[in-house]
Image (cartoon, rainbow, N blue to C red):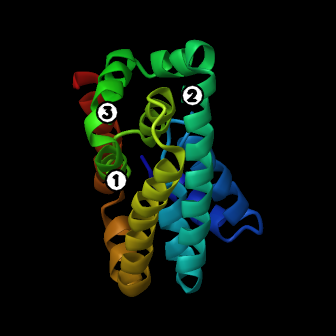
Amino acid sequence: MFRGLYDWTLRLANHRHAIRSMAAVSFAESSFFPIPPDVMLVPMILARRDQAYLIATVCTVTSVAGGMFGYAIGYFLYDSVGQWLIGVYGLQEGATEFRSWYAEWGAAIILVKGLTPIPFKLVTIASGLAAFNFPLFVLTALITRGARFFIIAALLKRYGAPIQDFIERRLNLVGMAFLLALAGGFAVVALI
């Protein structure tokens, strides 16, 4: 079921535009795109373990830049674009709840949510909507996204061959677990 997509992603990982493509996905995911950059990050690092930290760096920087764009959507455009985007994902109640949480837990929310499968775009838009301190937002986004992507890079660089073997032998299981985690992230936000 996932074999074709996995093989295509591994081939893309060796393409000369692979890092740029992943950067675009990473940027977009932090502000409006539903698919996390891990879909490209993991196969790219497996294909190019010698560039694991470069790939993680690009993913982190573009994710934070996309987060700034998401913040701008929440801060400047929430009444139009922001509400529409939140509505597309069915997260209207979650965004309202996040706004009230920011008064007390802003930095902690960004740090925790940035590591989870909960859509980071909701955090970035809600941060702008709540007019959360922008420099602190950027710093916490950099910490949490960097931690997520560099942990993945370090594990794949160190244990890449056995992990790749595990993924390839149990590709359908890994693919379904990823889809469940992604759906679970959206479900958790919808329940909050």
What is the number of the mark on residue 75? 2
Mark 2 is on which residue type? Tyr
| Residue 111 location (% of width, % of height) | 34, 53
Image check: 55 left or right of 156?
Answer: right
Mark 1 is on which residue type? Leu
- What residue is shown at x 61% (from left), y 19% (from top)? 81
Image check: 168 left or right of 101?
Answer: right
Mark 3 is on which residue type? Ala
- Check if mark 1's residue and mark 3's residue have beta carbons within 8 Å: no
User: Observer-nearest residue: 36 or 164?
Assistant: 36
- Inter-mark Cα distance, 3 to 2: 15 Å
10 Å neighbourhood of mark 3: few (<14), some, or many (≥20)?
few
Q: Quadrant of residue 144?
A: bottom left
Q: Is residue 154 above or below residue 189?
A: below
Marked residue nearer the N-terminal end (1 or 3): 3
- Closest to the camera, between mark 1 and mark 3, is 3
- What residue is shown at x 31% (from left), y 44% (from top)? 109
Marked residue nearer the N-terminal end (2 or 1): 2
| Residue 18 location (% of width, % of height) | 69, 63
- Check if mark 2's residue and mark 1's residue have beta carbons within 8 Å: no
| Residue 141 location (% of width, % of height) | 46, 54
- Closest to the camera, between mark 3 and mark 2, is 3
What is the number of the mark on residue 111? 1
Q: Is residue 135 above or below residue 146?
A: above
- Inter-mark Cα distance, 2 to 1: 20 Å
Q: Is residue 17 above or below residue 52?
A: above
Q: Which residue is mark 3?
A: 103
User: Observer-nearest residue: 126 or 154?
Assistant: 126
| Picture quarter with the C terminus | top left
What is the number of the mark on residue 50? none
10 Å neighbourhood of mark 2: few (<14), some, or many (≥20)?
many
- What residue is shown at x 48% (from left), y 58% (from top)? 139
